[in-house]
Image: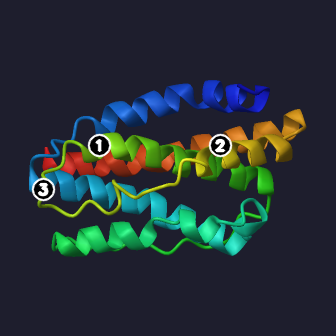
Amino acid sequence: MSPTHRRLREATGNAHTRVDSLFGRFDLTRRDDYAALLAAHAEAVLPVEALLDRGGAERLTADWPQRRRGPSIRADLAALGAPVSVPETAGAVAEIAAMAGMLYVLEGSRLGARFLARGVPDHWPRAYLSSHQPSHMWPELLAKIDSLLYEPQLVDVAVIAANQTFGRFEAAGARWLDKVS
């Protein structure tokens, strides 16, 4: 594991643990909980994807359009009859190091989502949680992040952005968990 990977993982470890614990409290065999989990993810993912779109995430990874999961989460929510309104996010992320931190969290959440998908009944929509990612995409992203974050201050920017992205997941998850508890 490279120093960049280690730094990102270690510096976001507490936030990651909190988010995993929080989303583990949703009962994915209950339709309301599942819809709430998806709504919480939409509340976190959609604004971050919009920021990355406007910031030019293709500068970070040319396959950015294939990594986006916004359409699949919207489709799953619509299929459940639970469309969610996500407020518009102004601005863009100009710093590629910040984009790297944000994308690190989004792509990492894809790996965790596949685990969550196992608890969802087969007859419910699971395009978002089960979204396929070819095996080469995660290591390629990490290699790209390593090549871009070659200075400590760049890693610091990525860590801040990653923790802020985890914070979006945590805040949205807590709000939606309160609604179904």
Instruction: Give the vertical position of 94 relative to 161 (above or below).
Output: below
Q: Position of residue 121 (x, y in %)?
A: 12, 51
Q: CA distance from mark 1 to mark 3?
A: 15 Å
Placement of the C terminus among the 4 image quadrants:
top left
Instruction: Give the vertical position of 82 relative to 129 (above or below).
Output: below
What amino acid is labelled 3 in the image? Answer: Asp
> What kind of element bears circle 3?
helix
Q: Badge 3, how many Cα within 10 Å: few under 14, some, many 20+?
A: some
What amino acid is labelled 2 in the image? Answer: Pro
> What kind of element bears circle 1?
helix
Badge 2 or badge 3: first in the primary sequence: 3
Return the mark for residue 116. 1
For the point 40% across and 41% down, the residue is 112
Q: Is 123 positioned to the left or the right of 97 in the image?
A: left
Residue nearest the observer in this picture, 87 or 102: 102
Q: Is 58 positioned to the left or the right of 104 in the image?
A: right
For the point 45% across and 65% down, the residue is 69
Return the mark for residue 32. 3
Instruction: Give the vertical position of 163 relative to 54 (above or below).
Output: above
- Residue, disc 2: 139
Q: Position of residue 61 (x, y in %)?
A: 72, 61
Q: Is 131 positioned to the left or the right of 108 in the image?
A: left
Q: Badge 2, how many Cα within 10 Å: few under 14, some, many 20+?
A: few
What amino acid is labelled 1 in the image? Answer: Leu
